[in-house]
Image (cartoon, grey):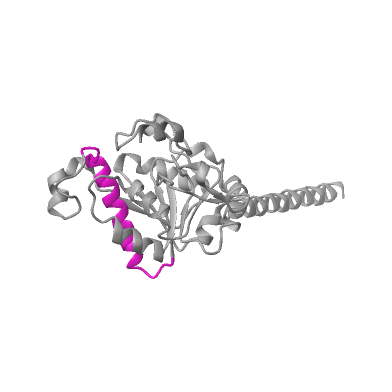
Amino acid sequence: MLSNEFTGVAICILILVFVSYFVVKISNNRIESFSLNEHNVLDNYFDMIVCICIPERKKSIIETFRKWGIKNVHFFDAFLKKDYSHEDFIKMGFLDKDYSSYLNVGRLCCHYSAMSVYKAFLNSNSKSLLVFEDDLRNDTYKNVSDFNRKITPIIQNIPKDWEYLNFSKCYDFCSKEESINEYWSIPNRPLCRTAIAMRRNAAEKIVQNTSKMKELPGDKMIGSLIQNKMFKAYSTKDITFFQHREVFGSNLENLAKTNPQKCANENILMKVL
């Protein structure tokens, strides 16, 4: 009798352990599944997301997007300055023969790569494009939840009539910008293309007006279009994505050793001009 009771108790304990194991297992799987399936707010908003990258930065940027939960990103292999010369771009009709010495081959490859992405976007059925460069600072956001918590209100407050967005502008004439809401302003001449977005109208005008280089790099040509009100452009009031210059340096031989400053030193520029 005692043996039977002991056996019954043992069976009950085993059943409890067995059930508890599967409850914990299922619970853990749910947490893991939620984590894996949590949508990044950018994936939900933009039709096409592209990252322009050079080979030595690709592993790092893939890890960054994985950390932030950005899944629907396409990687565009940038044109490399080691493979081209000024003469190559002149022959392609992309560079004027009387070009400025400021336009080094790195700057030419940068804009040529970007233009290739813009053209691919225009040849697709997508209505909006988000473009990242490959030197993003990985520690800006801890994970997808942190990313969404901070970025969602920015996305939700994008002006409805936007045609061009700059999430990380640099060297803008900030005294001339116009505030729209808590997160967005109308910039004057925003530079840098760390993270920009565009709709088809802006992409068409950029392609039409910046397809041949002579004096200005690509971001300055686009900045001039914005300054001349060629399309409706907005920029975030705070830098949303940072360049990690301390790690990656500058492939364009730019001088800033850290992320470029958001606003230009207008007083200094006015003295120079």
Residue 238 location (% of width, % of height):
55, 43
Check if residue 19 falls in the magenta segment. no
Q: Is residue 72 above or below residue 85?
A: below
The quadrant in which residue 73 appears is bottom left
Q: Residue furthest right?
A: 1
- Principal secondary structure, stretch drawn in magenta: helix
Q: Is residue 265 above or below residue 80?
A: above
The quadrant in which residue 102 appears is top left
Which image quarter holds the C terminus?
A: top left
Residue 271 location (% of width, % of height):
39, 31
Q: Residue at x 32, y 62 (%)?
A: 120
Question: Depth check: 130 or 233 in front?
Answer: 233
Question: Depth check: 223 or 88 in front?
Answer: 223
What is the magenta range?
A: 101-127
Q: Is residue 132 visible?
A: yes
Q: Is residue 265 visible?
A: no
Q: Disc count in the image?
A: 0
Q: Residue at x 67, y 52 (%)?
A: 27
Q: Is residue 215 left or right of residue 255?
A: left
Q: Is residue 156 above or below residue 139?
A: below
Q: Residue at x 73, y 49 (%)?
A: 14
Residue 142 location (% of width, % of height):
56, 40
The quadrant in which residue 74 appears is bottom left
Residue 174 location (% of width, % of height):
50, 42
Q: Is residue 19 left or right of residue 1?
A: left
